[in-house]
Each structure stands twice: as structure tokens, then as C-alpha cells.
Image: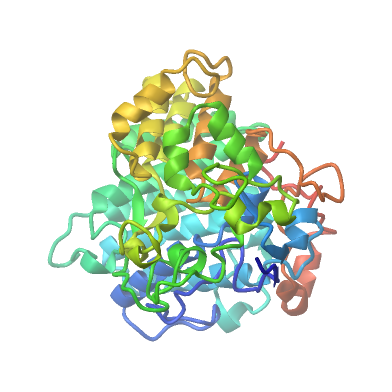
């Protein structure tokens, strides 16, 4: 098989720009307000947030879920960790572009609480991404157009605290009943179809994610407890069973209008392999973990088996950093039926993979967040039940047959990090299962949790330049050229030592 030389383009980034450009896209300039309507802009903005999640390979690589196959050369920065300010340069601009759209909705739908509330939730969602990548970023001085073309930076901790307030405000907006003066977002809400109850649950779940991320920050425990108590008192609850946050603006089998992950990593509208189809696979670390815990039902939905001798029918992958001919695309586990199901023309089982919704946040993650909060004594409830519900929701989302029974059979094994009763470290078990459940849905969030907890014990790349993984992404070259004084004011930044504020 021909080996391809692959260079990561700026458009293919951590949560980078994707084929959604031109599909509900309304704004290309983060300093230029759109000329549209709040309904059109919110639909486009929600779609663009989900589309950026299609490209979460850095998190997936560095947290031991994915690896490049042996059919592609390159990925040197990812494999060596020797990244520069040109690495993922488009991500920064893309997220701020998206945030400009949400600001437009917030400012132009002030009397449409059903829309302004959604915009505020997504403001918090996107700013958390920025902090989790870069730590200090422009926030209070950002998105002001010509009034502040060189925005000052805010500390990550300050931004995190303010995001809780933003989410509180969003919930207030989303509590206003839908009426003639406050019509439903309806079809413009491509996540929940205008269901403001689910939006309040999403907001609370996002708050819980933000709060638990800070568990290792000195002096924050009382604040975290108080804020979680406020969530419980508010009463809307968290995302529950089958309440995944899914984005589908109406995908069609047309180039640029399909599920963005499927079109990039799966197959084209012409039923051909997508450009990246043979370049990505599951890592040896991930496959070995799934095998060792008898998690074959989920593995069969996530991954294919090798199709070439001598590995035909096996689940396998390379160690991250390896890339020889023993790991060509035909000899490893590529993305399977739940993630990128081949069309019937290519021996698949259906022709609707292009129409599958993009996942923004899973019900499984919600249950695991709740389980951790209960286990730490911050929330009332049964941590074991919540833990097992998280596993069940993962099985369901992947489409495992008879998911509830299969999940029960799995978590009733006497295996650490699988069975609640067999796990001496309950927090480790929760985070481990979250790592599995996030695989191929949100590798970046899995990487955040790894940086917070050290779970799982991910091996270094075989080509690492040092003895540790990066703890962050470097500020982009675009900031050093357009906002030099403020970005240089953050000091000398190292991907290995300049930690996000919530990392130990």
C-alpha cells in the first residue's frame, strides 16, 4: 500500500475548522459583526461549534485513544511533542469567530430569552475550551471590534469564575416561559429543538464540568461545594438518560453538508474513502485496555478489525509514535460502525452515516460528572448507580445491541475500574470509564481529564523528545504578530511547564 506524506493543515486542528464552511456559516471575521438575524446566526454558530469537535485528534492522540496508521508519514509535532506557535494556528481564530456569533445573538436577541440563554451557554462552552488549551486568554476585552483590536488577557481562573456567572444568567433567561413575546428557538436550535428545559440541564452539566475541573486548585474546595449546592437548589438537574447534546442541522449526502466527522474520517458523498480514512486508527494502548477489561461490545462498535494477513480479524493498533508497514491501514483497527460506518457500496450495512448527528456532550459524561461529585461529598445521590448509568449511556450511544443488558454484564465483572465494588479508587474508576466513553466523541475533553487526574496512565510517544507530555497548546503565531505586547506579557510559554491553572 502506498504510504502518504501527511501535513496537518491549519484547517485541521484540535477542534479545527471543517467542511462546515459554507454550510450555515455566517461570519468569517471575529472583529466584524454579522448582518443577519439571531435565528439564522444561532443555527450557524451551533453547527460550527459541533463541526470543530470533529477534529479532536490531538486530545485523542495524547490521551492514548488514537494513533496515525502506518499508511501515513508526518504527524511529527504530535508524535514528538515538539510543537511551535504555528501548531493549530487556526483554532484560536476559529473559536473567537464562533464566539462573535454568539455575542451577536446575545446582543440582538435581548428580548428573546430563549435565544440569548442559548448564546450564553455556548459562550461558556467555548471559553472553557480556550482556557483549557491556553490558560490566560482575551476575555473581558475581547470581541470589541475596532474598539479593542489588541485585547488584553484575563487569567484563566478569573475567566472560569465568570463563566459560572454567565451560566447562571443563561439559566435565568432559559427559565422565562416561551410565549408570543419570547418565542421558541424552534428549528434554529439544532441541538434541542427549542427545548429550554434541556438547555438548563446542559448549562448545569457544563457548570459541573467547570467546577470539578478545578478540584486540585488550592483554596477552591469551599467555592466548588457552594456552587454545586446552588445547582442542586436551582432544581433543573443535569443531562439524564438519552439526553445527549447532539447537533444536526439537516445533514444531506452532499459534499460539505454531511456529518463533519464522517466526511473527514469516513467516506465521501460519492461513497469513496475520505482523505483521512486510512490515516487514523485506534492505538495499541486503547485496544489493549478494551481487551483486558472484556469491553468487546463497545470495541466492536468503535473499531474495525484488520483486513490483511497475518492480522485478519484482529483488533490492533500501533504504539503512539510508531508508523511502520506492520501498521498499514489494512492491518489495524480503523473507525468502526458507530463512528464511520461504510456505505453499502463499500460493504457497509447502511447508507446513512453521513446523517448521524455530531456529539457535543454526552449523557454518559453527565452521569460520570455527577458520580464524581457524589463520591466527593459535593452532591447527594448514589455514586455507584450514577457510575453504572454512565457506562450504560455509553453503550446506548454506541448502538450496542441490548445495550442495558450488555452494559450490566460488563460492569458486573470483578475488574478494577469496571466494577464499582472491585475498584479501590472510585475517582480513578469514574475517570477511566469517562475516558472510554469519550473515545472518538471528544478526545480533547479526555485529554483535559487526563491532565487533571493522570487517568489513565498513558504511555509516552515512542518518539517523545523528553520525559513528559505537553500540558497545553502554545499561543498561536497570529497573536504574536497582531497582539504582541499582550501575548508576550504572559511570559515565556512552554508546552511542558506553562500549566493551565487547574493542573496540579
Q: Is residue 273 left or right of residue 140?
A: left
User: Residue drawn 33% across and 40% down?
Assistant: 396
Q: Residue 116: x, y in percent?
A: 34, 64
Tell me, yes or no, if residue 380 can be seen here.
Answer: no
Picture quarter containing residue 344?
Answer: bottom left
| Residue with the most extreme bottom position | 35
Which of the two residues, 73 or 95, is positioned nearer the viewer here? Answer: 73
Placement of 19 over or under 266, stated as above or below: below
| Residue with the most extreme left position | 180
Picture quarter containing residue 213?
Answer: top right
Tell me, yes or no, if residue 268 can be seen here.
Answer: yes
User: Residue drawn 44% across and 27% down?
Assistant: 371
Placement of 377 over or under 209, stated as above or below: above
Which of the two residues, 200 or 328, is positioned nearer the viewer here? Answer: 328
Which of the two residues, 174 or 444, is positioned nearer the viewer here? Answer: 444
Q: Quadrant of the N terminus?
A: bottom right
Which of the two residues, 331 or 90, is positioned nearer the viewer here? Answer: 331
Q: Residue 441: x, y in percent?
A: 47, 51
User: Residue drawn 51% across and 38% down?
Assistant: 436
| Residue with the most extreme front position | 309
Q: Quadrant of the C terminus?
A: top right
Q: Is residue 135 left or right of residue 19?
A: right
Q: Residue 220: x, y in percent?
A: 61, 33
Picture quarter containing residue 395?
Answer: top left
Placement of 159 over or under 89, stated as above or below: above
Amino acid at each position: 500500500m502506498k504510504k502518504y506524506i501527511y501535513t496537518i493543515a491549519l484547517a485541521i486542528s484540535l477542534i479545527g475548522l471543517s467542511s462546515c464552511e459554507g454550510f450555515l456559516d455566517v461570519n468569517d471575521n471575529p472583529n466584524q459583526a454579522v448582518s443577519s438575524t439571531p435565528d439564522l446566526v444561532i443555527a450557524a454558530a451551533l453547527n460550527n461549534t459541533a463541526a470543530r469537535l470533529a477534529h479532536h485528534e490531538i486530545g485523542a492522540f495524547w490521551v492514548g485513544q488514537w494513533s496515525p496508521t502506518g499508511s501515513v508519514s508526518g504527524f511529527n509535532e504530535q508524535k514528538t511533542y515538539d510543537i511551535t506557535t504555528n501548531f493549530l494556528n487556526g483554532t484560536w481564530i476559529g473559536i473567537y469567530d464562533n464566539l462573535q456569533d454568539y455575542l451577536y445573538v446575545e446582543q440582538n436577541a435581548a428580548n428573546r430569552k430563549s435565544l440569548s440563554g442559548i448564546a450564553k451557554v455556548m459562550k461558556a462552552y467555548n471559553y472553557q475550551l480556550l482556557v483549557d488549551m491556553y490558560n490566560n486568554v482575551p476575555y473581558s476585552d475581547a470581541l470589541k471590534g475596532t474598539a479593542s483590536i489588541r485585547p488584553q488577557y484575563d487569567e484563566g481562573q478569573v475567566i472560569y469564575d465568570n463563566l459560572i456567572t454567565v451560566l447562571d444568567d443563561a439559566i435565568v433567561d432559559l427559565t422565562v416561559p416561551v410565549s408570543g413575546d419570547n418565542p421558541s428557538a424552534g428549528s434554529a436550535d439544532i441541538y434541542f429543538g427549542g427545548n429550554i428545559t434541556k438547555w438548563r440541564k446542559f448549562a448545569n452539566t457544563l457548570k459541573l464540568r467547570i467546577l470539578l475541573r478545578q478540584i486540585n486548585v488550592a483554596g477552591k474546595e469551599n467555592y466548588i461545594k457552594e456552587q454545586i449546592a446552588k445547582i442542586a437548589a436551582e432544581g433543573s438537574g443535569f443531562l439524564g438518560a438519552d439526553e445527549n447534546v447532539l447537533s444536526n442541522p439537516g445533514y444531506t449526502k452532499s459534499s460539505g453538508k454531511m456529518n463533519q466527522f464522517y466526511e473527514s474520517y469516513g467516506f465521501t458523498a460519492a461513497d469513496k474513502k475520505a482523505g483521512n480514512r486510512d490515516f487514523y486508527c485506534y492505538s495499541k494502548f486503547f485496544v489493549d485496555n478494551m481487551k483486558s477489561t472484556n469491553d468487546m461490545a463497545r470495541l466492536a462498535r468503535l473499531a474495525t478489525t484488520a483486513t490483511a494477513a497475518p492480522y485478519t480479524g484482529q483488533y490492533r493498533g500501533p504504539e503512539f509514535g510508531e508508523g511502520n508497514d506492520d501498521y498499514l491501514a489494512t492491518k489495524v483497527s480503523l473507525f468502526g460502525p458507530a463512528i464511520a460506518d461504510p456505505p453499502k457500496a463499500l460493504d457497509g450495512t447502511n447508507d446513512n452515516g453521513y446523517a448521524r448527528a455530531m456529539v457535543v456532550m454526552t449523557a454518559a459524561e453527565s452521569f460520570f460528572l455527577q458520580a464524581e461529585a457524589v463520591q466527593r461529598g459535593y452532591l447527594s445521590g448514589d455514586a455507584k448507580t450514577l457510575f453504572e448509568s454512565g457506562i450504560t449511556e455509553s453503550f446506548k450511544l454506541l448502538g450496542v445491541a441490548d445495550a442495558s443488558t450488555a452494559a450490566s454484564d460488563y460492569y458486573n465483572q470483578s475488574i478494577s475500574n469496571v466494577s464499582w465494588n472491585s475498584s479501590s479508587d472510585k475517582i480513578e474508576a469514574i475517570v477511566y470509564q469517562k475516558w472510554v466513553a469519550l473515545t472518538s466523541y471528544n478526545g480533547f475533553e479526555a485529554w483535559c481529564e487526563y491532565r487533571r487526574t493522570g487517568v489513565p496512565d498513558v504511555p509516552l510517544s515512542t518518539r517523545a523528545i523528553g520525559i513528559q507530555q505537553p500540558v497545553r497548546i502554545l499561543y498561536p503565531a497570529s497573536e504574536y504578530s497582531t497582539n504582541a505586547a499582550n501575548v508576550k506579557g504572559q511570559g515565556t510559554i512552554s508546552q511542558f511547564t506553562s500549566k493551565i491553572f487547574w493542573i496540579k
